[in-house]
Amino acid sequence: MDFNNTHDSVTRRIRAITDRVSMAIENDLYFYNQPIEELHGGAKVLVRGREMGMYASYGYLGLLNHPRINEAAKKAIDKFGTGTNGVRSLAGTLTIHNELEETIANFKHTETALTYSSGYATNLSVVSTLMGRGDYVFSDKLNHASIVDGCLMSGAEFRRFRHNDMEHLEGLLRNSPADVAKLVIADSVFSMDGDIIDLPKVLELTKKYHAWLMIDEAHSVGVLGEKGTGIEEHFGLGDVIDIKMGTLSKTIPSVGGYVAAKKEIITYLRHASRAYIFSAALPPAQAAAANEAFKVILDEPWRIERLNQNTKQFISGLKGMGFDTMLTETAIVPVLCGDDDTAFAMTREAQHNDVFVLPVVSPAVPEGLARLRATVTAAHDPSEIERAMDVIGEAGKKLGIIS
Ligand SMILES: Cc1ncc(COP(=O)(O)O)c(C=O)c1O
């Protein structure tokens, strides 16, 4: 293949990305895909031979390497081996899968649950299996890419409402035909901005307009609510969300995704969603680790308290220095930099001073809103957070973001 033949659209696409990557590498501004060599406790890592404070992980409760969780995974390997050799519907279902689904259903206060091999596959498959041509799906503009892809794949009419703008959502619902199936879908905690969907209002609107409600709890499990059970607990609501989606790869230190819902919905998805039917089951160790992690969250509520304290310290400290942290209320803390180059330069300064943060730039966020997306966890010590903020503050001054 001749990569200089730019008449070919495939070549043009490949070149656009590879040129951007090469430029970034040449200018020492490429920070993605760096291998972590070692984990040092819950909040430090060894990268390129340097110990760095980790401020880019979604392990909100510091559960990675928790002895109970590791032990459960090891036992599952001893019992079942390392894979399943099949899809769930055929030879791939193990007792540990059923146990995990029961644990999730109890944790999320629903009738039952279903797991998939990733959070991405969960959203893609669940949305596109529930919705179809002629139906209407209403999605927050800042929803995760896996939701957007699921909506597009479904073939349903795709309406995007302005971020957390309930008047806009209501207008779109009002203007849709009365007699079609409707689904409103949103992240619970938005993965780029750290703010929380206005669930009580969304709920009111879904009731008024007879729409189904699906919420992605990737960043709220272990984070919201005193017990860490998520967004319904946070707002003091009962079991009000029709389809509660989540991942097993963030607070839960494993991999996979799930939906928790009423039995009929899960039976339908178990027999109709393609990511479940045509893709291999979660490996036993990962299912067992996830199963134990939900129990650890309930047994160790001090982790949530600690996360809340660390979050407060981090947000108020950065704001106090003059940074714009947008509307975050959670452990995902955007540090607004402006243009992409400034976000890259901030990252370089931080990483050269052993603070592992990563930039989010366009097109993942709108032009001019490039940022560091920093995260804190329950595993950070307040003194480490203070040091990270000093480093970010110095970098911000050097680059003229704060004075
Ligand atoms: C809101 C949200 N939903 C879904 C996913 C996909 O989850 P996973 O990484 O487990 O596939 C992510 C991951 O970044 C996410 O942030």
Image: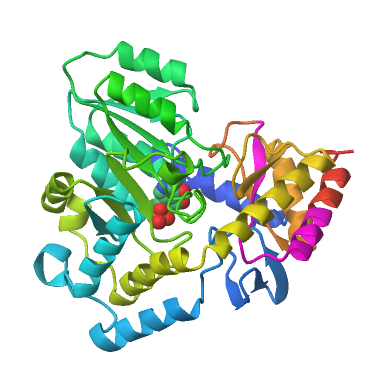
Between 169 and 18, the one nearer to me in the picture: 169
State yes or no: residue 378 in magenta: yes
Between 385 and 242, the one nearer to me in the picture: 242
Q: Position of residue 216 (x, y in %)?
A: 39, 44
Q: Colour scheme used in the picture?
A: rainbow
- Identified at 51% across, 40% down, the residue is 190
Task: Please determine whether, in this image, residue 39 is positioned above or below residue 217.
Answer: below
Q: Is residue 369 left or right of residue 345?
A: left
Name of the residue lying farthest toward the right: 403
Task: Please determine whether, in this image, residue 104 is positioned above or below residue 286.
Answer: above
Please identify the quadrant where the C terminus is shown. top right
Q: Position of residue 289 (x, y in %)?
A: 38, 73
Task: Please determine whether, in this image, residue 188 is positioned above or below residue 253.
Answer: above
Q: Position of residue 385 (x, y in %)?
A: 75, 59
**Which range of residues does the magenta coloring cover?**
368-391
Between 236 and 403, the one nearer to me in the picture: 236
- Rendering quarter of residue 231: top left
